[in-house]
């Protein structure tokens, strides 16, 4: 696969998000948020599978043989996900949102297996800073950060000691770095990491084995790589304007899988909403499974 984004299959997601590679399955799984659907694609066979969900799932993470799903009213578990069988989520923890009409958005596990996820008001036009970043604990959801509009770009350095987080709302459109306490699962010392992308807004992200931070430039059709000291060193084009999230995977963890969004004003025949794969010359790290 060349170092250019090639389309995977022919599906178009409304909001494709949270792709996760699972080595045990040799497949990517991701969510189409408004369509309440989970998708899975196996590169070796080219086969797709899909599962209907009872609510919108903003993000997913591995848990045992199944998955965690951060949905509209809480975090759920789905213990099995087999083609031809329904996904039957069971709620682990409910959430009391700070405002009406909210849902979970971006999230993932830290390197120790704690699940973190952010919430947002679904109407982005309101620019309401009611979003929070939560951590799933044994006794429920703990608030780690608040005053967020659209929390996104959550990722962790290879040693787990740096946490990255973006706010992708146009009024903020920046990425922060935090010192992350690996013992308590607490972010501290918030500071700017990327004040503004060259083009587009920061959306979902991934970290490679060398600590590079890969961020989707939503509205610009770009994937950017930043070094751990915040220097931009690679840019890749994607033939979809609203790239949403990227994730490393494949047999050598050297393929970057990219989801995108199909907006209401998408041009007929455009690839907005498609999924893509490329080999950018870097290797990633497999996602840590949830211990919760």
Image: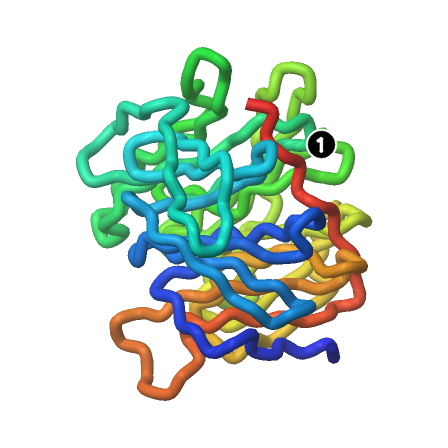
Asked which quadrant contains residue 249, the reply is bottom right
Residue depicted at x 37% and y 45%: 57
Residue 238 visible? The answer is yes
Judge the density around disc 1: few (<14), some (14-19), many (≥20) Cα neighbours within 10 Å: some
| Furthest residue in direction top, as rendered | 139
- Report the side of 116 relative to 65 (left or right): left
Q: Quadrant of the N terminus?
A: bottom right
Would you place residue 106 above or below residue 277 in this image?
A: above
The kind of secondary structure element at disc 1 is: loop
Residue depicted at x 65% and y 51%: 25
Would you place residue 72 above or below residue 22 in this image?
A: above
Residue depicted at x 80% and y 59%: 252
Q: In x, y percent, where is residue 219?
A: 43, 68
Residue 235 visible? The answer is no
* Nearest the eye: 32 or 173: 32
| Furthest residue in direction bottom, as rendered | 269
Asked which quadrant contains residue 164, the reply is top right
Would you place residue 171 above or below residue 178 in this image?
A: below
Residue under numbered circle 1: 160
Q: Quadrant of the C terminus?
A: top right
Q: In x, y percent, where is residue 110?
A: 63, 32
């Amino acid at each position: 696969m060349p170092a250019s984004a090639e389309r995977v299959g022919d599906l178009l997601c409304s909001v494709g998000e949270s792709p996760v590679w699972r080595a045990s399955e040799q497949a990517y799984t991701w969510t189409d948020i408004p369509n309440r659907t989970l998708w899975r694609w196996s590169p070796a066979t080219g086969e797709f599978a899909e599962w209907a969900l009872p609510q919108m799932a903003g993000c997913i993470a591995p848990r045992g043989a199944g998955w965690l799903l951060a949905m509209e009213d809480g975090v759920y578990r789905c213990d099995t996900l087999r083609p031809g069988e329904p996904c039957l989520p069971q709620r682990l923890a409910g959430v009391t949102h700070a405002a009406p009409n909210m849902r979970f958005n971006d999230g993932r596990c830290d390197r120790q297996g704690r699940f973190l996820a952010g919430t947002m008001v679904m109407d982005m036009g309101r620019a309401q800073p009611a979003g929070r970043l939560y951590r799933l604990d044994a006794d429920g959801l703990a608030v780690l950060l608040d005053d967020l509009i659209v929390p996104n770009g959550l990722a962790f350095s290879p040693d787990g000691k740096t946490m990255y987080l973006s706010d992708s709302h146009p009024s903020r459109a920046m990425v922060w770095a935090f010192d992350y306490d690996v013992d308590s699962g607490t972010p501290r010392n918030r500071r700017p990491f990327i004040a503004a992308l060259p083009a587009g807004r920061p959306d979902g992200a991934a970290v490679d084995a060398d600590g590079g931070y890969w961020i989707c430039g939503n509205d610009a059709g770009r994937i950017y790589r930043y070094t751990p000291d915040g220097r931009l060193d690679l840019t890749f084009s994607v033939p979809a304007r609203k790239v949403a999230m990227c994730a490393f995977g494949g047999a050598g963890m050297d393929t970057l899988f990219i989801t995108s969004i199909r907006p209401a004003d998408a041009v007929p025949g455009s690839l907005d909403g498609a999924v893509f794969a490329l080999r950018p010359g870097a290797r990633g790290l497999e996602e840590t499974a949830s211990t919760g």
